[in-house]
Image: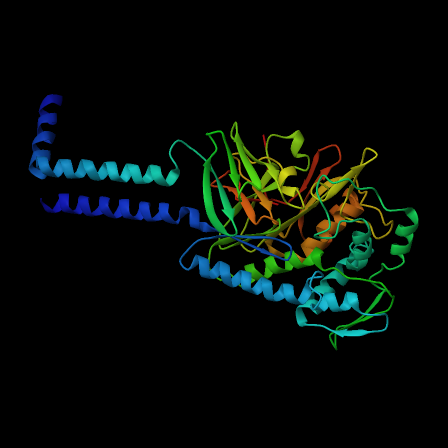
Amino acid sequence: MKKSDGNAVRRSLATLFRKGDIIVLALLVVAVVLSVVAVTGGDDGNFALVHIDGELKYSLPLDRDASVDILDGAMTIVVEDGRVFVSRSECPEQLCVHGAPLTAAGGMTVCLPNKVIIKIDSGEVDAIS
Amino acid sequence: MNKIVRLLVLVLVLVTLTVSLAACGRAERFYFHEVFGTFLELDVQGSGRKDFADSVYDGFKADEALISADIASSDIGRINAAAAGETVRCSEITMNLLSVCEKVYLATDGAYDPTVYPLVMLWGFAAGDFVAGGNYAPPTEESIVQALSLVGFDRVFDIDYESGTVTKLVEGAALDLGGVAKGYEVQKTVDGGGDRKFLINFGGNIGANSARYTVGISAPRAEMSTLAYIGTFVLESGETVTTSGDYERYFEYGGKRYFHIIDPATGYPADGGLLSATVVTLGGATDGATADALATAMMIVGEERAVQLAEIFGVGCVLVRSDMTVAVHLGDREYTPAM
């Protein structure tokens, strides 16, 4: 019973698709999957988006430890164990250095004097008040 | 290829294109500017996002030129520079904001007072002066008493709403609308947002338009928590939220924390037993400017009176007490404590 059903399906598929069609379709499915992965950033990977003077300059993956010097070394952004913080800044207010570290849960660090904003992309919260 | 295969190919190509385009636009959702001495973030959806963000920023810049205490040619700059007896003609926005100030001043028995500015300057908390982590000491008792004589919304200025003028009555008195301006601008943006979906975050004053957003409430002691927020709730379209707290502009001296919200009754930082006060204009019952002023007042008046004020004005509030426990008064709105 089952076997003959399977044969019937295979036969009707064969009338629908030719070999070349299957290859084209398979390639397209791969393209869809790849573009979806590109959008969601892969394995739930979150990014810290670093905007300087209103322009997006860096997307730092939270799952990769890093120390990034920006503004010719005037400011250092550190990614460590999934947390992002400003370790050092040559700015008058120092609010950025004393702010809470950012995590995948979301948040934003602002350094007005340096015109730097670090924001977690697609965190659990859209904004923090 | 037969028809079905062609259709499938077409659908898959379209899906790929759409998703890829979405990927391109992903990072271009956020627009940042600096205005009013703080940041302006717009998280915008739909076409013409950048133009929209730019137009909001342009509007804020225009208002800043009228009401910023840091701009000498602004209404507030001219009022603050005026001698006693001098009358300053003001723009409509200044008069609107002064009427909001007066409303909250009266409702809070003077706890919210925009004329507390000389004390804020004396303490070194005025914008541009303060350095986080810097070495500061409280001002002397005499200087506080002296500055207190310049404070009192009902007596140091004469405000004539009909003619749109402000007359200084006490030499040295000064105004700062920083406690209402951010909430006002956020409300104005939301009111004029039409059906465009966006979130606006103006120095922690947040508004939602044509969409709902999850908003976190800042953890007032970041060093004690793993998350940047203590809890979340959903901000509905048309609502705004604002938080006042003791955790950004503060210094420690002799083991005590001194922060930027000065109680006009004492001349010292607020002592209401709260680390932060968050006000939400649930259902848009009250405007963002009023909510902004209320959050400041709540830090001064403490929990019991804060909850009464929330009821009077029809707003929701979340208060973080000194012991880090949280009082949630958001009506039916769900509040989710962070893990």
- Residue B291, given in percent of the width and then of the height, sits at 68, 54
Residue A9 in sight from this viewpoint? yes
| B300, above or below B256, in the image | below
- Total of numbered circles in the picture? 0
Q: Residue at x 74, y 61 (%)?
A: B101
Which image quarter holds the C terminus of chain A? Answer: top right
B271 or B234: nearer the viewer: B271
Percent position (x, y) of residue B172? 85, 63
Q: Residue furthest front?
A: A72
Q: Residue at coordinates 6% horizontally, 37% vertically from top-left? A: A15
Give the vertical position of B241 relative to A4 (above or below). Answer: below
Quadrant in which the N terminus of chain A appears: top left
Q: Position of residue B326 (x, y in %)?
A: 69, 36
Q: How is the image coloured?
A: rainbow
Q: Residue at x 44, y 53 (%)?
A: B45
In the rendered structure, the answer to whether residue B241 lies left or right of residue B169 reads: left
Q: Is residue B287 visible?
A: no
Q: Quadrant of residue B132?
A: top right
Q: Residue B33's x, y, as percent?
A: 55, 55
Please give left or right for residue B1 compared with residue B68 in the image.
left
Furthest residue toward right: B142
